[in-house]
Amino acid sequence: MLFDPAPKDKREDFFDREEEIEELKLLSSPITLILGLRRTGKSSLIKIALNELNRPFIYLDMRKFEEKRSINYRELLIEMEREINKLSSKFSQLIEFLKRIEGVSIMGNQIRFKWQGNDRLSFTSLLEALNDFNKDLIFVIDEAQELIKLRGIDLLPPLAYAFDNLKIKIVLSGSEMGLLYRFLRIEDPSSPLFGRAFLKIELKPFSREEAIEFLKRGFSQININFTEYDKVYEEIGGIPGWLTYFGYTYSRTRDLRKSLDETFSFAKRLIIHEFENFLADKGEARKRYLNIMRTVSVSCSSWSKIKRELEAMEGITISDSVIYNYLKHLLDSSWTVKNDDVYCPSEPLIRKTFE
Ligand code: ADP
Ligand code: MG
């Protein structure tokens, strides 16, 4: 069912994106990036591809760490342990490959990783062992930009090692594209991943036509007569997750106004919560970020207008480099987009939340 609000794992429940599914399934580069705003269907795309490929996989869901300001090696390894134990309950021979590396202990059939001391588990050795176990393995890190908060371990050398020497495939998804690039430092000549060619798959929001087709298909699946497609697109925009929520709500209420309002209040709660996470490490600048979001939501604004507004609100001069830095962070985390030198909210419900 198209309007099921959970992430999809079957193609028949997923609208369109056929090319993207096929492209992902090819895994034509050692590292594939799945990019797109929140709720454009990245996790669903990955789950569908994994299901159809039927290869062993590890799926790390980094959303768990969205509210944290930092992540340590222990926390990362706990997540890895859980996933690897899941895998080894299916493929018992995996234990034989892991046993050989330092920092791994086996209790019964449970695998434990050592995160501290000279003999702690090396992430590179772990990836090598997984590669020796099964070269078809796919290692997914969903919302991988969270890894930028990792302290006490640098994951770039193991990722680069895997890129250059191993057969296993790595899939990284990111809602905050700029942040993911900043983590990978692809364009930084001193980065271990510099110059590597990643396969990039981007999920864009639906266009008006696609959104209408999505709603048509969804309503016809559940035998509901619906005609107000344009109205829905104008109020909600093309983010698949919001359209799904709308369809789901409408199927219950059969009331257009009520369903639109409910979709917006649901979206607003989530967006505010996610913006709070974004602000968590912004300290004194919190108010300024909020003011910028308000300014660009009232109407898309140029750099100089944003500066003027901020300065007028505080009655002081703020230096260009400070403003530049705020705007960069908002762009990197996909809160805003920049078109023709004006900054806008990245999607309509973000605009509605802040205006
Ligand atoms: P992301 O991982 O990008 O945040 P999800 O895969 O969690 O997105 O999808 C968000 C919501 O939108 C889920 O309810 C999912 O079922 C729905 N969704 C996204 N894209 C589609 C699509 N193409 N067809 C049907 N439902 C979709
Ligand atoms: Mg997701």
Image (cartoon, grey):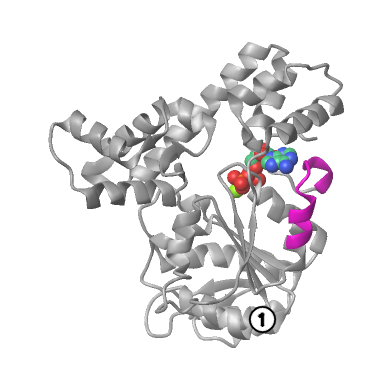
Q: Is residue 22 highlighted in magenta?
A: yes
Residue 82 or 301: which is nearer the viewer?
301
Residue 226 or 106: which is nearer the viewer?
226
**What residue is at 74 percent from the left and 33 percent from the top?**
209
Give residue 228's position: percent from left, percent from top: 73, 17
Residue 120 or 190: which is nearer the viewer?
190
Task: Please name the residue that numbered disc 1 is placed on.
Answer: 131
Q: Is residue 16 highlighted in magenta?
A: yes
Residue 52 or 296: which is nearer the viewer?
296
Give residue 90's position: percent from left, percent from top: 75, 68
Q: Is residue 200 left or right of residue 12?
A: left
Give residue 202's position: percent from left, percent from top: 63, 53
Residue 199 at least partly seen: yes
Picture quadrant of residue 1:
top right
**What residue is at 70 percent from the left and 14 percent from the top?**
253
Q: Quadrant of the C terminus?
A: top left
Type of residue at label 1?
A: Asn
Give residue 204's position: percent from left, percent from top: 63, 45
What span is in magenta? 11-23
From what the image shows, is residue 57 above or below residue 236?
below
Q: Is residue 225 left or right of residue 350?
A: right
* Label 1 CA crowd tier, 10 Å (few <14, some 14–19, many 20+): many
